[in-house]
C-alpha cells in the first residue's frame, strides 16, 4: 500500500469528495425531474420508478466488485475508469429519447457509481492517519451533504429552465476534469495482492441484482406473483451460496472474519438502514409535493431544503466531535434523530392525505 504524501492530501480529499458529490447528486437530482420525464415520454409511474431503480440495482450489485477490482488492479486506475463510465453514461442519459434508453443508460451510470463510490472512500481513508479520519470523513460527508441539499433544487431549477435532459449534462464537465486530474494528483495504491474471486463476484452480483429486482417488482405486482417470488428465491439462494463460498475460498473478496468485528458490523448496518430509509423517503416526499400537492419542481426542491441541507452543516461538526468522544454515541444519536424525523413526516403526510382526499394515491 502506498500512502499519500502530506502535500497531496488536499487533492485526495478534493477528488474523492467530487466523486461522492457526483454520485449522490445524480441519485437525487433526477427525483424532482420525474414528472417532467413522465410528461415528455408519456411514461407510466412504473417506468419512472425504474429510472431510479435501474441506477440502484446496478450500484447494489456492483459495489463489492468495484472495490475488489481496485484492490487488485490499482485503486487510482479503477477509480478513473469508474469516472469515465459514469461520465459517458451521463451523456447517454441526456441524449435518451425513450424511457427504455434512459433506463439502460441509468444502469451503466449505476455501474460507474459502484466503482467510484467505494474506492473514493478507500483512497481517502488510506491517505490520512487514524487520528484525522473522523474530521476528514466529516468533510467528505459534508460535501456529500451539499449534493443531497442541492440535488432537488438543482434538479428543479434545471428542469424548469433548461429541461430535464440538462440534469445529466452537469456531470460531464466535472467528470472530465476530475478524470484528467487523477493521474497527476493521486498516487496509485493496491490492496492485498490476491487473485480475483470470480465465483464470489458472480454470486454476489447475481444475488444482489435478483433480490433488489424482486423487492422492486413486488411493489408493482404483489408478493405472490411468480416472477417476483422467483427473483427473491434466486437472490436468497445466490447470497447464501456466496457466504458459503467465501467461508472456504482461499482469497475471498469479502472475508467473513470482518463480521466478527462489532464496529464493522454496526457501522455497516447503520449505513444500510440510514441510506435505505433516506432514499425511499426523499423519493416519496418529492413525488407527493408535485403529484399530490401540485408544486413545481423548483418549489419542491426548496421545500426539501431544510431536510437535505442538514448534513452539509452537521456532518463536519459531528465528524470532528467523533474524534474526541468516539463514533458510537454520534451514530446512536444520529440514527435516533433520523428515525424520529421520518416518523414525524409519516404522521404529517398521513394527516395531509386524509385532508386532501388522498390526491397522491389517486395519481399513482
Image (cartoon, rainbow, N blue to C red):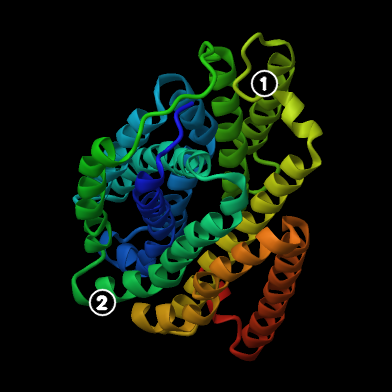
Residue found at x 66% / y 59%: 323
The front one of 38 and 179 is 179
Residue tagged 2: 160
The extreme front residue here reads: 6
Residue 24 against residue 114 in the figure, above or below: below
Residue 163: tell me if it is visible. Answer: yes
Residue 25 against residue 105 in the figure, above or below: below
User: What is the crowding at mark 2: few (fewer than 14 residues within 10 Å), some, or many (at least 20)?
Assistant: some
Q: Earlier in the sequence, mark 1 or mark 2?
A: 2
Please state the horizontal and vertical placement of residue 235, each as a whole percent of the image.
Answer: 65, 30
- Give the quarter of the image for residue 342: bottom right
Please state the horizontal and vertical placement of residue 164, each as a whole percent of the image.
Answer: 26, 65
Please state the horizontal and vertical placement of residue 205, each as a whole percent of the image.
Answer: 54, 27
Residue 307 against residue 129 in the figure, above or below: below
- Give the quarter of the image for residue 301: bottom left
Residue found at x 47% / y 55%: 49
Residue tagged 1: 242
Count of numbered labels shown in the rendering? 2
Residue found at x 60% / y 81%: 358
Residue found at x 50% / y 40%: 118
SS at mark 1?
Answer: helix
Please state the horizontal and vertical placement of residue 114, each as a whole percent of the image.
Answer: 45, 39
Calculate the distance from the C-alpha at mark 1 to the C-alpha at mark 2: 46 Å
The front one of 245 and 345 is 245
The front one of 226 and 346 is 346
Q: Would you say 141 lies left or right of 158 here? A: right
Amino acid at each position: 500500500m502506498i500512502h499519500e504524501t502530506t502535500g497531496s492530501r488536499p487533492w485526495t480529499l478534493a477528488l474523492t469528495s467530487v466523486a461522492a458529490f457526483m454520485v449522490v447528486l445524480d441519485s437525487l437530482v433526477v427525483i424532482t425531474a420525474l414528472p417532467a420525464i413522465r410528461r415528455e415520454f408519456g411514461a407510466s409511474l412504473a417506468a419512472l420508478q425504474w429510472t431510479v431503480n435501474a441506477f440502484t440495482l446496478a450500484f447494489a450489485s456492483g459495489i463489492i466488485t468495484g472495490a475488489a477490482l481496485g484492490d487488485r488492479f490499482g485503486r487510482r486506475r479503477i477509480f478513473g475508469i469508474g469516472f469515465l463510465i459514469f461520465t459517458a453514461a451521463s451523456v447517454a442519459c441526456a441524449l435518451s429519447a425513450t424511457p427504455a434508453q434512459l433506463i439502460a443508460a441509468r444502469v451503466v451510470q449505476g455501474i460507474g457509481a459502484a466503482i467510484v463510490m467505494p474506492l473514493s472512500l478507500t483512497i481517502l481513508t488510506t491517505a490520512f492517519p487514524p487520528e484525522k479520519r473522523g474530521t476528514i470523513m466529516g468533510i467528505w460527508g459534508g460535501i456529500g451533504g451539499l449534493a443531497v441539499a442541492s440535488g432537488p433544487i438543482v434538479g428543479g431549477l434545471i428542469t424548469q429552465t433548461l429541461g430535464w435532459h440538462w440534469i445529466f449534462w452537469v456531470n460531464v464537465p466535472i467528470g472530465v476534469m476530475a478524470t484528467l486530474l487523477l493521474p497527476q494528483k493521486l498516487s496509485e495504491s493496491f490492496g492485498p495482492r490476491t487473485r480475483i474471486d470470480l465465483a464470489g463476484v458472480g454470486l454476489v452480483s447475481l444475488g444482489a441484482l435478483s433480490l433488489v429486482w424482486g423487492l422492486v417488482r413486488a411493489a408493482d405486482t404483489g408478493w405472490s406473483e411468480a416472477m417476483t417470488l422467483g427473483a427473491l428465491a434466486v437472490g436468497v439462494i445466490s447470497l447464501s451460496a456466496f457466504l458459503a463460498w467465501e467461508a472456504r475460498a482461499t482469497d475471498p473478496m469479502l472475508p467473513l472474519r470482518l463480521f466478527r468485528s462489532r464496529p464493522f458490523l454496526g457501522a455497516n448496518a447503520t449505513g444500510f438502514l440510514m441510506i435505505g430509509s433516506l432514499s425511499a423517503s426523499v423519493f416519496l416526499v418529492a413525488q407527493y409535493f408535485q403529484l399530490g400537492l401540485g408544486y413545481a419542481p423548483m418549489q419542491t426542491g426548496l421545500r426539501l431544503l431544510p431536510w437535505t441541507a442538514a448534513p452539509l452543516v452537521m456532518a463536519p461538526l459531528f465528524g470532528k466531535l467523533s474524534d474526541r468522544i468516539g463514533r458510537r454515541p454520534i451514530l446512536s444519536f444520529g440514527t435516533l434523530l433520523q428515525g424520529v424525523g421520518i416518523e414525524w413526516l409519516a404522521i404529517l403526510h398521513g394527516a395531509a392525505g386524509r385532508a386532501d382526499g388522498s390526491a397522491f394515491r389517486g395519481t399513482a
